[in-house]
Amino acid sequence: MISELKDKNTYCNSLTNYSRRKTRFVDIGGVPLGGDNPIRVQSMTTVDTMDTTGSVEQTLRMVESGCEYVRITAPSIKEAQNLEEIRKELRNRGCNVPLVADIHFTPNAAELAAKIVEKVRVNPGNYADKKKFEVIEYTDASYDEELERIREKFTPLVEICKENGTAMRIGTNHGSLSDRIMSRYGDTPLGMVESALEFLRICEDLEYYDIVISMKSSNPQVMVQAYRLLVQKLNEENLQPYPLHLGVTEAGEAEDGRIKSALGIGTLLEDGIGDTVRVSLTEAPEVEAPVGRVLVDRYKSRENHDSIQPIEDIVHDPFNYKRRVTEEVQNIGGSNVPRVIADFSNFNVKEAKDLKSVGHFYLPELDKWKMNDQGCDFIYSGSTPIPFMLPNGLKEILDFEVWMNSDDKVNKLPMFSLTNLSENTTTHDSLNFLLVNDQEAFDLPELDPNKWVLILETSNEHAMPAMRRVFVHLRNSDIPVIVKRNYAGLNEDELMMYSATDIGGLLIDGFGDGVMLSENTYSPDQIKLCNQTAFGILQAARTRMTKTEYISCPSCGRTLFDLQETTAMIRKRTDHLKGVKIGIMGCIVNGPGEMADADYGYVGSGKGKITLYKGQDVVKRGVPSENAVDELIEIIREDGNWLEPESVEI
């Protein structure tokens, strides 16, 4: 892939100093996008589109919560027609929010909707194609014939949009690439980009430019790579700098949905990419805009951050994941999964029960320790040593001066500063930590990479690029690096989403051998939140899988069951299955495609009927919903991936 690109670091204005990508201005119903306009926040209704009153009431709640564009599904002509009634009632009630019709499979519905609403969204993977999961060998001539067929189907919509002043989003989904794209480009970010470019070239040939583009995936790593590659390709082909709609599809609910969304969306916002965002949560749609606002408000004054030394030669491939090569120091670096250090330096650990917050449980009746799947790997206790023996495998890190006075200099580990290091020579025989900030990291003494691990922190507001610059500087070093971030005075959403952006963005680029997440006002609840967030970031970045992952859509008017209730029910029965990915999709439109990354799938296929998948293969069709969860578990059991809950450690 990288050999196909002329220059691999022109996808953003700067890899170090914040500069938002300048995009084309697109007017969407009087709420302009791109250009010098602020980053917009949007969401999508979940009510049946034929329920006019319900759709209007929900839209009003969404607008009240901060939603600037509202998307409504229009899977057929009748729903497209009813958009006019919804729009009329909203305008009668004084609400002028731009409406976006969401179209899959039905060009005639798109053409009707384009005459009614301010914007239509089409998916190039299924607008002119029906997916049969077939691999087809195309000659150049036969491929060109397919492109001409697409042009014939798509041109009428473009002409209607031009005539009516309607904007359009060309929205590629990773899981719904056409068989034709899959056959030539595979299930890749390049395939996602080419899928959109085929439609975009037609628009430009017809001199239609009121376009927004998206590259969505339920895998944040794929999503980030696709958007970066899209910008790169737009530049190379001298196409217009269209504004970009950012989102991670089917992100899920609660902390998982927030962390996964922030990791994908935030990484791109850090690079100045993105003009509107939609955070897809399996929650009420009016919850999404405030969560999206947490992300975008962070960049209102980002240009004023401390300057960072420019990167003249990029050392990583921003379009393909490859982890930085480091030495293995005990269980850190090398081929080890990234490690989690829990920060107890502001909390005085007195009893074994104090470690419950970081996944380690003492059972006094058995006089033994147990650990759950999110048990931290190290505890940093700072200047106050823990007064009891820790469980096997859990190591304590102490400030150097305290470690020097410790009776146990073997099982306890020292944390140095550069000052300590210059004044003293006593070190641990096999594992030492050196805490440095992003400025100090440019002037390190010579360290043995077989004995030392860096803990890297920064106070720069533009934190991720500041630390990325350090990793570029360390290009010739194979010393492992733990990424440390300290967040004070933030609410729960801010802490999860800021850290997912700052740390997750580095992990996506292959940087980092662990996470140390801190919050100054320590309590057991805050320590637990930091620990769970650290593991959540590693999971969302696909670098350490420690829990069941749910790829669940945010619901829409096509949904055939209560998605929030069903997701909660499936989670209750399966959340002990470490590393298993389960897709929970409300309808057949997004189901097979958007859960492409899942091991198993639960998809609505009719009223009260569920289709169950293993990967992308249908295993059972038309399963009554009251039996579907049991049937899903049986499929997992037959596949050898089931564990009884009682057999799983606490």
Image: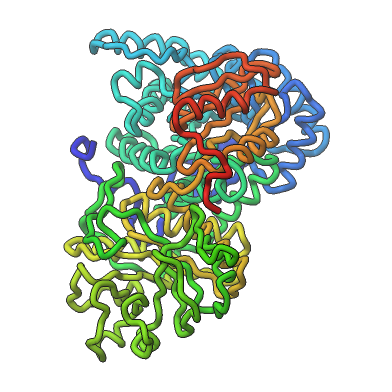
Nearer-the-camera pick, 548 or 389: 389
The answer to whether residue 162 is visible is no
Nearer-the-camera pick, 484 or 174: 484
Locate residue 324, reporting x and y percent. Answer: 25, 54
Residue drawn at point x = 32 percent, y = 25 percent: 186
Nearer-the-camera pick, 122 or 561: 561
Locate residue 162, reporting x and y percent. Answer: 53, 23
Q: Quadrant of residue 439?
A: bottom left
Locate residue 168, reporting x and y percent. Answer: 53, 28
| Left/right of residue 612 with respect to residue 559 in the rendered view | left
Residue drawn at point x = 53 percent, y = 47 percent: 648
Q: Quadrant of the N terminus?
A: top left
Residue drawn at point x = 62 percent, y = 22 percent: 604
| Left/right of residue 469 with respect to residue 591 in the rendered view | left
Nearer-the-camera pick, 27 or 283: 283
The answer to whether residue 510 is visible is yes
In the displayed structure, would residue 20 be above or below residue 365? above
In the displayed structure, would residue 430 be above or below residue 562? below
Q: How is the image coloured?
A: rainbow
